[in-house]
Amino acid sequence: MKPQQNTYDYGECEICDSPLQERRIKQDFWIRGELVVVDQVVAGVCLQCGAKVVRADIGRQLAALLGNTERIASAPRMSVPVVAFDE
């Protein structure tokens, strides 16, 4: 049996009018001063300019996930560099 192909049409990028293609991305959010990264988010991505959009159902799932403080508290942690911008 063949895997089911994506039939969702994300349309065109509102910035550069290129077609959006479905990809799995990492999406970051700042919640109460803490960076939270959600991995494997299904999104339409513009391969020209990098703009990203999610479907409404994915947005609702993200909102529920980010509202789950227990899941966020027990999630693995990562460290990221913080670099000061010098003018």
Image: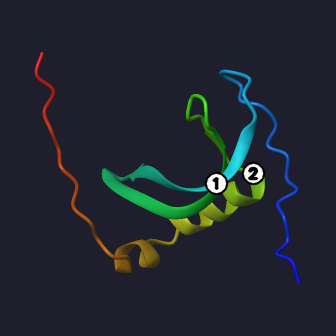
Left or right: 71 in relation to 83:
right
Colour mapping used in the image: rainbow
Q: Residue at x 66, y 51 (%)?
A: 43
Q: Residue at x 61, y 66 (%)?
A: 64
57, above or below 45, in the image:
below
Q: Quadrant of residue 4?
A: bottom right
Number of numbered tags placed on the structure image: 2
Local crowd size for mark 2, using a 10 Å CA cut-off: few (<14), some (14–19), many (≥20):
few
- Relative side of 7 to 42, left or right: right
Q: Amino acid at mark 2?
A: Arg
Label 1 element class: strand
Q: Which residue is mark 2?
A: 55
Q: Position of residue 67 (x, y in %)?
A: 53, 65
Residue that sits furthest to the front in the current view:
1
**Residue 71, how many percent across, how many down?**
45, 77
Horizontal arrangement in the rendering, residue 20 relative to residue 65 (left or right): right
- Image x and y of residue 65, in percent: 56, 68
Question: The disc labelled 1 sits on which kind of residue?
Answer: Arg
Q: CA distance from mark 2 to mark 1?
A: 12 Å
| Residue positioned 18% across, 49% down in the render | 81
Residue topped by disc 1: 23
Where's the C terminus, which quadrant?
Answer: top left
Residue reaching furthest to the top: 87
